[in-house]
Amino acid sequence: MMQLDLHGIGHSYFGRSVLTGITLAVAAGEVVALVGPSGSGKSTIAHIAAGLIDPSEGRVQRRYSRHAMVFQEPRLMPWASVARNIGYPLRRRDPARVTAAAQRAGLLPEDLDRYPVELSGGMRQRVAIARALVAEPDFIYFDEPFTALDVALKRRMQDLVIAAAQAARFAALFITHDLMEAIRISHRILVLDARGHGIAGARVPPGVPGTRGESAIFALRQHYLHEDPLFAHIHDIDERARP
């Protein structure tokens, strides 16, 4: 059962076509990573899929009950405590659910009374992930959430996503420019065409997220980058692309 279907999606900014013919699907319980060159439209696809942007053409079908989104920036309310930030999506206060979501994100009870200004970048992103988990969504969009983190912290955050997806069995579309990250966290990798003209192809890494060793992940990354033509342009940068 596909929980998300995009068919023939197109989008334009100020009359300039930036996406055409985008067709992809995400199954229940599946984590799909979308990679591609900087400026190719990866985040725009996620925003269209989540309903934040209307496409200029094509069809979006969402068959999940509720979704959440984790952005590159944590986007926390600076005047609110960690507990209030996590509980923001809930219609009524539910301390038990807030505490449970915080624990799944690796936060401690004593963290709940702190404020964003008191937290490191990694801790803020944990709060953002807990905020996404608290509403118990069956689909989560991740829009390059760990780009600003260092390598060691990024790996811990990736492990957190893998564990949370396995425990809660949500599906996810994970936008990233980091091929190692895509291999670590996903069941399937989609590669966006360098000019946003459809999905160029897909690859399924061996095994499942959480079972792939670091040496195997690195070897597969090297194979993709140096021997698989599908990945030839994923590190290209178009500085004239839309913001």
Image (spheres, rainbow, N blue to C red):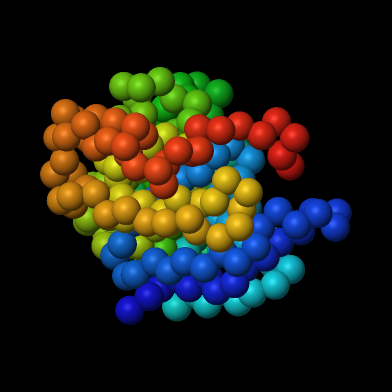
55, above or below 71, in the image: below
Residue 188 image point, x, y percent: 32, 55
Q: Is residue 55 visible?
A: yes
Residue 110 image point, x, y percent: 34, 30
134, above or below 56, in the image: above
- Between 146 and 199, the one lying in front of the other is 199
Residue 159 image point, x, y percent: 26, 38
- The quarter of the rendered structure image containing the N terminus is bottom left
Residue, far right? 14
- The quarter of the rendered structure image containing the C terminus is top right
Residue 206 image point, x, y percent: 18, 50
Residue at coordinates 65% horizontally, 63% vertically from top-left?
20
| In the image: residue 45, left or right of residue 108 | right
Residue at coordinates 24% horizontally, 49% vertically from top-left?
205
103, above or below 30, in the image: above
- Between 81 and 198, the one lying in front of the other is 198
Q: Quadrant of residue 180?
A: top left
Q: Quadrant of residue 216?
A: top left
Residue at coordinates 57% horizontally, 46% vertically from top-left?
194
- Between 170 and 108, the one lying in front of the other is 170
Q: Is residue 47 visible?
A: no
What is the total number of numbered labels drawn onto the structure image?
0
Residue at coordinates 29% horizontally, 31% vertically from top-left?
222
50, above or below 213, in the image: below
| In the image: residue 59, left or right of residue 1 | right
